[in-house]
Amino acid sequence: MAMAEKMRAVHEDGRVLDVTDKAWRSTRMAAMGWSLEGEATAKPPSPPSGSHTPPEPQTASEYDPSEHTVEEVNAHLDVVQDQTERERILSAEREGKARKTILEG
């Protein structure tokens, strides 16, 4: 079975995620603030002047499924290649909201 070709999606807050075309379409990621790399039309807001430092982009090891919708978590799990990280996310879901549409998917 051939691997699906991945596209790079960029969130308006600066996060980057590699997704398949199927995941992009099925989760309607564009409606959640994502755009495909090179297609972004809006720039992220500039940080206020002064000493404010913008937050660091979320890394995969910090992904908390309880902060995301079912569609977002399933889309993220579709692109996670590290089995240990995938199990960490599913474990966090089991211990948290325990949504069947994620755990049984």
Image: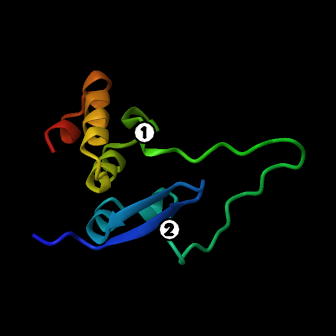
Q: Residue at x 46, y 37 (%)?
A: 62
Q: Which mark is residue 104?
A: none
Marks 2 and 1, how far apart at CA:
22 Å
Which quarter of the figure has residue 93? top left
Which residue is depicted at the point 76% across and 43% down?
53
Q: Is mark 1 on a helix, strand or loop?
A: helix
Residue at (24%, 26%) from the top-left corner? Answer: 94
Disc 2 crowd, CA 10 A, few/some/many (<14, 14-19, 20+)? many
- Sequence-wise first label, 2 or 1: 2
Which residue in the structure is indicated by mark 1?
61
Q: Position of residue 81 (x, y in %)?
A: 28, 53
Report the amino acid beneath label 2. Answer: Ser
Query: Depth check: 16 or 26 in front?
Result: 16
As shown in the figure, which amino acid type bears the numbered disc 1?
Answer: Ser
Q: Which residue is the extreme one toward the bottom?
A: 38
Q: Residue 35 carries which label?
A: 2
Q: In which quarter of the image is the N terminus?
A: bottom left
Circle 2: element type: strand
Task: Tell whether 1 sits left or right of 40.
Answer: left
Residue 104 as seen in the image, left or right of residue 25: left
Instruction: Give the class, few, some or many, for how many residues have Cα within 10 Å of label 1's Cα (few <14, many ≥20).
Output: few
Q: Can you give x and y, in whole percent of width and height, for residue 60 in the image?
A: 42, 44
